[in-house]
């Protein structure tokens, strides 16, 4: 066996090393050393990111094509790792509570195990590897959703998440079984050669797309999202809304473009219908929400629809715009959830939008971060979200989806309205019992600063898009 193939799996190996190190630290560290658990975890994740920040220079495969090392996948892995680090930083106050402080190690192990599954999923060259990575990402995520096991909503959310995950995985594997039955292989390259557009293969495509649609929260596979996001701990909600969704969207693009290229017309029509439904329905339901976590659940569903605009082209331009959109969406959405988490920890669980009335008067810095993040999510210039939407609209338009882009532009105006509802609450609507002034913990402040810099600079630094584009071709 050629063990040099493992060198292609540098991101996975370094992440597993970090996971094992934190597991052993949790197992053997005494009470005095446990005080340093958070800085140790952050430093190890920073080392992992630094080792893998430069993606591989070219495409390569290992283990007979089971594992694919792609430059674009390397960029996505770095983005997901940065998002995970920010989530870990924002979780410090929550993990310091009396009911969770002794389970800090469990949180790190489960979170990094989920991330490892995403890494395998987006580097898979075989459906067996893909499903293995997907399940490794899904099962620990269900444990994270139910992490606050003594809260009824968290336990309920965990049950809903694992049940819908099982159902979606069953649909997907049912479709994969049809692919294997009609082509006689599970390797992506070989499957593509055997796709002829037969009815059974089209059914396999629909089942596979439906299964992954659950993971991305596309309409009509989104019904679990609001309940799970509301019930899960806020930091886990942030993780699911950004890191998990982005990995699944990138994997969907790779498989549609590589495996189902012979039936591109079929999956593009399906994708157009789902994208329009996702953006439109999510926007309409977001307007009706009063709970801020449910509000951003529907916001994340809408953002998933915009991600699908990058998937639609199935080309290098679509991949570049998708990865860039993921990066910008990550910093904006994690800034929002960082503020929500900070307020929730200080107010013993205030999660209604009305609880943010008058936040500017008592906590102006948090209100400013939330406002800039909302402007970025809405696509208002000169923030990074404007440029990410511009590039993803441009890639979809150049791929021939002019009507789809027009509908998405109209929905962008709708989203601007409901994002401004929160800005109005913070700056204009007087609060009967506003959130008292408080100072966030250092890790949360640092994470919000990172997100704020990303929101302000990623759109202005055009070299970032150019770098992503170079690795996507």
Image (cartoon, rainbow, N blue to C red):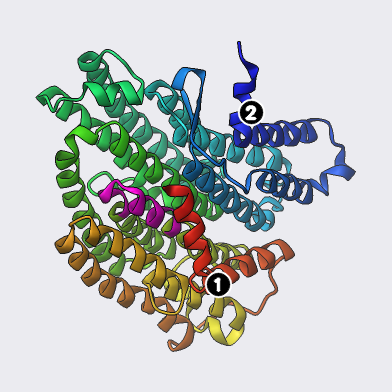
Residue on which disc 2 sits:
7
In this view, which residue lies farthest toward the right? 32
What secondary structure is the stretch in magenta mostly built from?
Answer: helix
Element type where label 2 sits in the image: helix
Query: x%, y% of residue 65?
Result: 45, 22
Q: Which residue is at 34% across, 25% downward?
A: 189
**Rendered image: mark on residue 470:** none
Label 1 crowd bin: few (<14), some (14–19), many (20+), radius 10 Å = some
**Can residue 327 be found in the magenta stretch?**
no
- Residue 287, given in percent of the width and then of the height, sits at 29, 69
Q: Seen in the image, is 239 located left or right of residue 23?
A: left
Instruction: Answer with the quarter of the image where residue 347 lies.
Output: bottom right
Q: Is residue 303 visible?
A: yes
Q: Bounds of the magenta span?
A: 310-324
In the displayed structure, would residue 422 be above or below residue 346? below
Tell me where residue 458 appears, x and y as whole percent.
52, 68
The answer to if 322 sits in the magenta stretch is yes
Left-right relation of 291 to 96: left
Q: Residue at x 41, y 79 (%)?
A: 381
Q: In which image quadrant can residue 283 be found?
A: bottom left
Q: Which residue is tagged 1?
A: 457
**Of the two numbered discs 2 and 1 in the rendering, the one whose residue sits closer to the viewer:** 2
Foreground residue, 329 or 218? 329
Q: Residue at x 43, y 76 (%)?
A: 375
Query: Which residue shows up at 68% across the image and 69% down it?
Result: 440
Residue 367: where, in percent of width, then height? 54, 79
């Amino acid at each position: 066996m050629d063990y040099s193939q493992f060198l292609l799996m540098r991101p996975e190996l370094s992440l597993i090393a970090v996971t094992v190190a934190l597991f052993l630290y949790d197992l053997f560290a005494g009470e005095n050393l446990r005080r340093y658990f958070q800085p140790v975890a952050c430093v190890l994740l920073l080392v992992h990111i630094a080792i893998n920040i430069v993606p591989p220079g070219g495409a390569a495969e290992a283990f007979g094509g089971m594992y694919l090392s792609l430059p674009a996948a390397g960029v996505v892995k770095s983005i997901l790792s940065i998002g995970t680090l920010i989530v870990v930083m924002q979780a410090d106050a929550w993990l310091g509570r009396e009911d969770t402080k002794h389970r800090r190690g469990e949180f790190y192990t489960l979170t990094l195990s989920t991330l490892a599954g995403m890494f395998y999923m987006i580097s898979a060259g075989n459906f067996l590897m893909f499903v293995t990575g997907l399940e490794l990402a899904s099962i620990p995520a269900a444990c994270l959703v139910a992490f606050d096991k003594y809260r009824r909503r968290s336990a309920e959310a965990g049950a809903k998440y694992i049940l819908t995950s099982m159902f979606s995985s069953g649909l997907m594997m049912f479709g994969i079984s049809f692919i294997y039955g009609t082509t006689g292989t599970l390797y992506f390259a070989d499957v593509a050669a055997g796709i002829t557009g037969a009815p059974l293969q089209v059914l396999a495509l629909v089942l596979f797309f439906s299964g992954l649609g659950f993971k991305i929260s596309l309409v009509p596979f989104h019904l679990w999202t609001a309940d799970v996001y509301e019930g899960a701990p806020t930091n886990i909600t942030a993780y699911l809304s950004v890191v998990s969704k982005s990995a699944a969207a990138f994997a969907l693009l790779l498989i549609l473009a590589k495996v189902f290229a012979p039936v591109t017309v079929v999956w593009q029509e399906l994708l157009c219908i789902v994208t329009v439904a996702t953006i439109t329905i999510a926007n309409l339901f977001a307007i009706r929400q009063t709970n801020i976590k449910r509000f951003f659940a529907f916001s994340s569903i809408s953002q998933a629809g915009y991600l699908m605009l990058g998937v639609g082209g199935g080309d290098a331009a679509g991949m570049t715009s998708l990865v860039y959109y993921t990066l910008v969406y990550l910093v904006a959405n994690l800034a929002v959830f960082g503020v929500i988490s900070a307020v929730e920890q200080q107010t013993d669980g205030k999660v209604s939008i009305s609880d943010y009335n008058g936040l500017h008067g008592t906590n102006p810095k948090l209100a400013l971060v939330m406002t800039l993040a909302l402007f970025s999510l809405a696509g208002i210039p000169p923030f990074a979200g404007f440029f990410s939407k511009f590039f993803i609209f441009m890639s979809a338009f150049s791929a021939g989806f002019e009507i789809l882009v027009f509908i998405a532009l109209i929905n962008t105006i709708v989203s601007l309205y409901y994002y401004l509802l929160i800005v109005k609450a913070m700056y204009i609507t007087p609060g009967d019992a506003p959130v008292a002034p408080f100072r966030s913990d250092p890790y949360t402040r640092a994470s919000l600063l990172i997100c704020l810099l990303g929101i302000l600079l990623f759109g202005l630094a055009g070299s970032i898009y150019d770098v992503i584009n170079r690795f996507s071709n």
